[in-house]
Amino acid sequence: RDAAPSHLWRLALSRRNIDPSKRNEWDLSKIRSAYDELAADAPSELVDRALARAQSSCSDYVRARRIYAESLGTSCVVAHALGLGDRHLDNVLLDASSAKLWDVDWGVCFDAGHRLRVPEKV
């Protein structure tokens, strides 16, 4: 499959007769089933492959993995400190050549996720 994560998620929900617009009515067992399906279909080494393809040597690849780990850690700490919610694969970009993550869509910041119609629970 080659589609945006949010599109794949909506497809998985629709196969279970779940209306994406009615989050407060979602059956948690069906949500878990949809997640498990998508997780099983996603290669666990997806990021690793992207980083390896973008590097020209083994030492560049090792450096890229270190930079990626630092970037991921920084992203998590900053997102937590700022109360940044709505984190999913459509809101995080990976620049494989530099191995850095970029958070995009900061619309749910400063714990605004708690005030959504269906509050975020982390």
Image (spheres, rainbow, N blue to C red):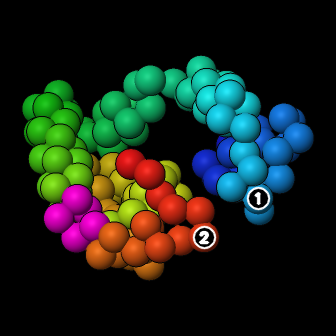
Q: Is residue 43 above or below residue 121?
A: above
Q: Residue 92 placed where, x, y %?
A: 41, 58
- Between 50 and 84, the one lying in front of the other is 84
Q: Residue 95 placed where, x, y %?
A: 34, 56
Q: Amino acid at mark 1?
A: Lys
Task: Specify the quadrant of the image occupied by residue 98.
Answer: bottom left
> In the structure shown, which secondary structural element does the residue marked by tag 1 occupy?
loop
Residue 3 visible, this angle: no
Indicate left or right for 102 with 1 as reference.
left
Magenta span includes 84: no
Q: Residue under circle 2?
A: 117
- Between 83 and 61, the one lying in front of the other is 83
First-in-chain label (1 vs 2): 1
Task: Specify the quadrant of the image occupied by residue 78.
Answer: bottom left
Q: For label 1, count other residues whose C-alpha is less than 10 Å away and answer few (under 14), some (14-19) or many (20+).
A: few
Question: Marks 1 and 2, Cα distance to the nearest angstrom?
Answer: 10 Å
Q: Residue under circle 1?
A: 22
Q: Is residue 103 above or below residue 105?
A: above
Residue drawn at the location 84% of the way across and 35% of the way down: 16
